[in-house]
Structure formats: C-alpha cells, structure tokens
Amino acid sequence: MIDRRSLLAGSGIAVALLGAASHAEQSPTSSPNDSVASLPPKVTEILARYVVESKFEDLPVAVRREGRRTLLNWVAVTVGGSRHETLEVAVRALVPFSGPAQASLLGRRERLDVLNAAFLNGVASHVFDYDDTHLKTVIHPGGPVISALMAWAELHPVSGREFLNALVVGVEVACRVGNGVYPDHYDAGWHITGTAGVIGAAAAVARLMRLDVQRTVWALGLAASQPVGFRESFGSMNKSFNPGRAASNGLFAAILAQQGYTSSDAMLEARRGWAQTISTKRDYAAMLDGLGQRYEAALNTYKPFACGIVLHPAIDAAIQLRTAHALEARSIERVDLRVHPLVLELTGKRSPRSGLEGKFSVYHAVAVAIVEGAAGEHQFSDRAVQDPTIAALAERVRPIVTPGIAPEQVELTITLRDGRKFERRIERAIGSVENPMSDAALEQKFRDLAVDILPADRVSELIGLCRDVETLASAAEIATRAAQIIGSPA
C-alpha cells in the first residue's frame, strides 16, 4: 500500500501550508506582504509526489474494476470513431508529416509516430461524444489519458498492471484538478476535458516513465502550459480535436520533462499559473483532500447515449415513455420537458444540419429517442437529423427552463393528439454513478460500435483483453489487436 503517513505528512495540505513560507521564497509571484496563511498549498508538488509513489497494489478492488471499465469503454469508442469523417480528414492531413511508424490507430491500418497517434486516437475516442464522463466536472478523462498512455506503451512496452495503475493515476489527477476549478472555469467557456485532461495525460505517462518527483513536477507544469479547447467548438470537428490535443500535449510534456526540460515548480497553484489564470474559482482542497485514499477515478461513468451528458435524462425519459405506451410520432401533439438552464445553453441547437450538431440539440435528441427508441451513434448521424419524421417531431419538442430542476434531472410530458398525457421524471439517468451501466451493457456497447469495423471474434478478444488487462505482459497488445483489421483503412 502507499505509505499514507508519508504521503500526507510529506506532501499533504497541512504540511504544504506550513511550508508555504519557503515556497514563497521560491515563487517570483509572491510579495513580502504575503502571509503564510494566504498562500496556497504546493499543489503541483503534492500531485507529483502522489504520481511517483502510487502503485498498483495500492488500488482498491473497486477502483481497479472501474479502471478496467474505463479502458473497455475507451477502446470501444475509439474503434467506433475510427472511420468517422473527422478521422479521415485528420489522418489525410497528418500522415504526410508523421514521423516513424511507432504506434497504432485503433480500428485502422495506419501507424504513426507516438505524438500523432495519441492525437488521432484521442480524436476518435471523442468524435461520437460517447466516451466516459466524470459527472462532477463533465471531464471525459479516458480520451486524453489513455490515448497518451497507449501510444507510449507501444513504443516502450509495459505490463498490464503498470498500465492500469498509470491509467487510474492520470484519471485521478485530471478529475482532481478539474474539481478545483469547476464550474467557473467551464462557465467561462473552456472545454475542461482539454484543459484538465492534458494534466492527467502528463501524469499518467510520467508514471509509466517512472520519473522522479522533480521531473514529474516539470511534466505537470509543461502540461498545464498547454490548455486546449473552448466550448464554442461544440458541434464541429474541433470539439474532438480538444481531447486529442490534450493527449498529445500531455505526452509531449512528459517526454520533455524526462530529458530535464524544466518548468515552474508551482505551475498549478502559482499566482500567474494554471488555476489562477483560467478560473475565478480555485479550490485546492478539492484537488488534494483524500489523495491516495478516496478516488475520483471510482466515480467515472459511461454513456448509454451518444451525445452530450446533459441530454441523457431527457432521452432516458423519452425512451421509457415510448416503450411503456408504444408511442408513435404521428400521434404526438407536443413534448414538454422541464430542464436546467445548462440543457439549453449546451444543447439548444434548434435545427441541426449534421449528425455532429444533432448531438447538441435537445429537440433532435428527444425526437429521435421517441421515433427510434434509441440514442446510439446511428441516431446522431446525418441520416437521422435529415429524417422528415424525426425533424417534424423535433419541431413539437418544447424545453422549458425550470427553477429547482438540477442538471441531472428532467420532467418530461408527452401530450397526444387525443388529449392523453404521459409523464416521467428522471432523477438519475441510466449511466450515472447511482444508476450505472452494467458490465454486460458496456460490452454490448462495444459490440455495437465495432460491428462494422472488426470481426466478431476480434471484438470478443478485445473485450477479454480489457477485462483481464492486469494479466497482460504487454498492455500494447490491446492496441495492436484493435488495429489489425480486414478491409481498407478507409
């Protein structure tokens, strides 16, 4: 187990605060009038020490299980997204400039250098908006963290146990730094998966590299210097660019730090560092409390629906009512739903023109869920958005911002043309921490995403490799098996 006494005593908040005076002497941003009590803890150093000292044996059974599920979901959505137009464009653009063929693109034949492979797998993992979600911060940590890890693991093979530990470390760091700035940082317009995910990616790769504390501090600092992504990108290819870039930037930071490329020792907490610059909220206790004892990685969740997480309660309610009452679009007069303001802020596209835009339209999401009884990737395609029956029903969907409704809740009422009404309230949608997807459902999601890309026996093999990752001599076997496909790469 981690020596928690040494972790907390050597690098915890209390000692960091007591050591703030010496920290102030090292920081060019402090002034002689700063008091010890007003200075933040040594967040960068504390997280770096956690990264260095973490071991597979420290991980509780439940955390290991969630790490495996995070890996399984990442492979599923990355393979599934590997043939999307976004990937075709990106591969076409980057292959001519790629370095040595070092790492795989899941679901494809091409092999690129590790930085470009990390980027492209990160893009593929997010292009369907079907990836894992830390609901407290709406970070999708798997894309940045695992895309970086897998690329490095192909170049420098590591065991499945080492890989899983580094995965958990990266997810933990990404979500904890996110805890410290959410929601203010997100409300300002930053895409937090990119801005926090890059730090998690650097932490994960630094763990695989077995960097010392100083070099890990530099890796975190270099990663924090590369925040990427704005919410304005949502609905375009640019959205999946953000976790892809976070993966390659985090890997880039760790590679530089490994060779002694320096950064500030206080990049996360310094007055002109990451948290102070990108957010009006800076809760360092949320970043550090219970570090090594309580795991944010255990709270990761997986989407049953291929769209923004704020749409899931409405979709869940719509599918439940459709199934219970055998509803058809032509019999529906209108659909009223009472929602949190964030639903319209994030998914208020009234008339989406593409499948990507449909993922950010509550009107389309509810309509397609009622018409087709599902909300997978096929329901957020160009075909579905342009379907006249779905589009007509979407015109009769009426979201109403309602005080007292939380982001994870919805009250949905379907009024039929004959005057009958059916209502459903969702407190926690399927896929949430309180109502999680089962292992069987997650495996079926994998099969559904990979069915047109990998042979059925290969899909079953990959599910087994993810489920038993701790037993693998080389974690890179997952990437190489996912990339060995039949058919052309296009």
Image (tube, rainbow, N blue to C red):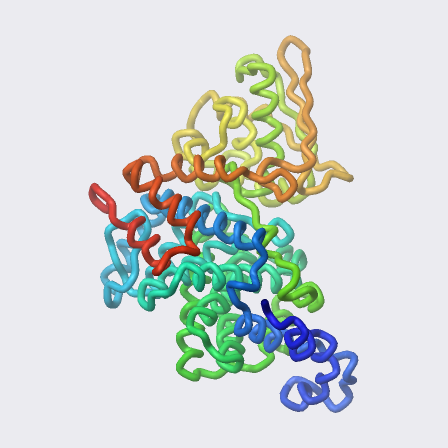
Q: Quadrant of the C terminus?
A: top left
Q: Is residue 438 left or right of residue 18?
A: left
Q: Is residue 260 left or right of residue 487?
A: right
At a point 72% along the width and 87% down the height, the residue shown is 21
Viewer can see residue 51: yes
Can you give x and y, in whole percent of width and height, for residue 462 in the image? Answer: 36, 46
Tally of numbered tags: 0
At a point 54% along the width and 70% down the height, the residue shown is 51
Can you give x and y, in whole percent of width and height, for residue 349 in the image? Answer: 54, 38
Indicate whether 100 appears above or below 328. Answer: below
Location of residue 155 by image quarter? bottom left
Q: Quadrant of the N terminus?
A: bottom right
Can you give x and y, in whole percent of width and height, for residue 430 in the image? Answer: 59, 36
Indicate whether 169 appears above or below 412. Answer: below
Q: Nearer the viewer, residue 127 or 199?
A: 199
At a point 69% along the width and 35% down the height, the residue shown is 427
Indicate whether 343 appears above or below 213. Answer: above
Can you give x and y, in whole percent of width and height, for residue 337 in the image? Answer: 66, 29
Viewer can see residue 195: no
